[in-house]
Amino acid sequence: SHIYDSDDEDDMIRVHRTRPRRIGGFFFSILPHASPRPILLGLSLSVTLATFWLLDSVKDPLFAALVDGNLSHHQPRAKICSVLGTLCIVIAMEVVGNRRKQRYAQRHVTEQE
């Protein structure tokens, strides 16, 4: 049986305390010097794509059931509405983002004065 002396134990405690704690310990055990941002961005992209593919596979059968199989009449309007809805959401997000940047810049300027 191996018995640790007190110096070895103190060294192990010191090393453990100085090691930075990070979210996602599994990923950082594989890549110890990796930044969490690329991993989180990759995971969010994977979730987004998986959600898109899942909803895309459900969309056509569900839409066909809603319009009693008359896709040729209703699908062009639905696609135009979808594009316009997406455009409205993107414009709204841009407006909100620009206003937040302006408020942040104004606060920064008044704090520096």
Image (cartoon, helix red, strand yellow):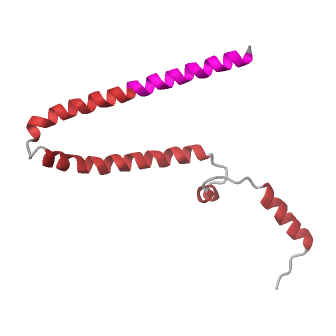
Q: Residue 103 lies in what quarter of the image?
A: top right
* Extreme residue in the bottom direction: 1
Q: Is residue 8 above or below residue 41?
A: below
Q: Tell me the quadrant of the picture where the N terminus can be found.
A: bottom right
Q: Position of residue 51 (x, y in %)?
A: 36, 49
Residue 17 place in picture, x, y as percent: 80, 58
Is 61 on the left-hand or right-hand side of 28?
left
At x 59%, y 56%, the residue is 27
Is 49 on the left-hand or right-hand side of 101? left
Q: Which of 35 and 87 is in front in this view?
A: 87
Q: Give the range drawn in magenta.
A: 91-112
Horizontal placement of 105 versus 11: left or right?
left
What residue is shown at x 63% (from left), y 48% (from top)? 34
Would residue 25 be counted in the magenta stretch?
no
Q: In this view, does 66 lie above or below 26?
A: above
Task: Locate residue 27 relative to residue 57 in the image: left or right.
Answer: right
Query: Which quarter shows the C terminus?
Result: top right
Q: Where's residue 38, x and y in %? A: 55, 44
Q: Is the magenta stretch mostly helix, strand or loop?
A: helix
- How far from the left and from the top, in percent, is residue 28? 63, 55
Residue appearing at x 42%, y 49% in the figure: 47
Q: Is residue 93 magenta?
A: yes
Q: Which of 13 and 4 is in front in this view?
A: 13
Query: Residue sitting at 50 percent across and 21 percent down?
Result: 98
